[in-house]
Amino acid sequence: MSIAVLKPGLQTTVQSRPRRGMRHLGVPASGAADPLSLALANRLLGNDWDAPALELTLLGPDLRFDVACCFALAGAPFAATLNGAAIVCHQVQRAVAGDLLVTGSAQVGARAYLAIAGGIVADEVLGSASTYLPAGLGGYRGRALEKGDELSFVPREVPDLATPEEFRPTLLTSWALRSCVSFETPQLSGAGIGQLFDTNWTVSRRADRMGMLLEGPTLEVLSGGRMPSSAVFPGTVQCPEDGAPFILAVDAGTTGGYPRIAQLARVDRHLLGQVRPGDHLRLLLREPQAAVESLHAKLAYWRPWLPDIESILC
């Protein structure tokens, strides 16, 4: 049973849960850039939250279903049609053999997730079926989809279901992400710390699953922007010698040699997957305890619809 890829889109990959517990071995987390949206798509189909699904980036693929199946989209709203008829996110869709799904560009946000009832068959490597492009691990042959690829799945019928309105995230072009100071924040000048947290940064064209460069004032780093390599994580904000902050994302490595000037709080880290070039981004300074309290509040909000929310927003 398969889905044929007629056009691959800009960067369409198979994604699932992150790879956990191996950063000390140099294995990055990877996984869905926006795990909340992945979970929302799978929730509609009765899948586990981390069942392998397609991650669509900015411009989606054209697919042909070679067998009847149920599917769902969640995340950034893409212009999508099934046999020419418009379909919407956040509800179960049904296809029969020969149906054509065309996904255009994201209207706002960066990524959507196309889940299939039963999950897509994918290569599991080091505890996850997620594609890690830099090393060619997992997913579909360790790479983004290409024309002519065929995705396998085991079809399963599911009832009609739609995500309740209160659990449909609103996507924006301006983002305010809660953040805490990090190990080398004191290496910024006093003016630099103020600029870091008071600037409405613009996301540059250099933005992908590895991370995103912020455009705005040049920050002054007392160390000259260099230091011995140290541990970094998704959401770490680094500042190299040119003074331009760079936020690490899900595919970033495990160590880096630039000052770590901030760390996105776990409560908002999943939002990085929806930030796109040209968006505006502001870092909201929070004390660690306040960030923890915000996380607990978000977990409590989502738990009635996504019982595994603690694992999703890991």
Image: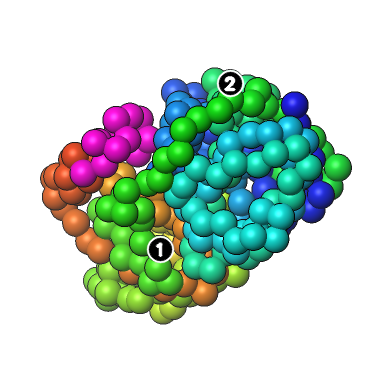
Which picture quadrant has residue 272?
bottom left
Q: Is residue 39 left or right of residue 97?
A: left
Magenta span of residues? 301-314
Q: Choose the circle earlier in sequence order: 2 or 1.
A: 2
Q: Is residue 164 left or right of residue 31?
A: left
**Residue 6 x %, y %:** 81, 49
Q: Amino acid at mark 1?
A: Leu
Residue 223 among magenta residues:
no
Instruction: Work out which quarter of the rendered image holds the N terminus and state it.
Output: top right
The residue that disc 2 covers is 126
Q: Which mark is residue 171?
A: 1
Taking depth in this image into account, of 100 and 38 the one nearest to the observer is 100
Taking depth in this image into account, of 263 and 104 the one nearest to the observer is 104
Which coloring applies here? rainbow
- State how far apart marks 2 and 1 are (Cα): 32 Å
Q: Residues within 10 Å of mark 2 (few under 14, many from 20)?
A: some
Taking depth in this image into account, of 218 and 13 the one nearest to the observer is 13
Badge 2 element: loop
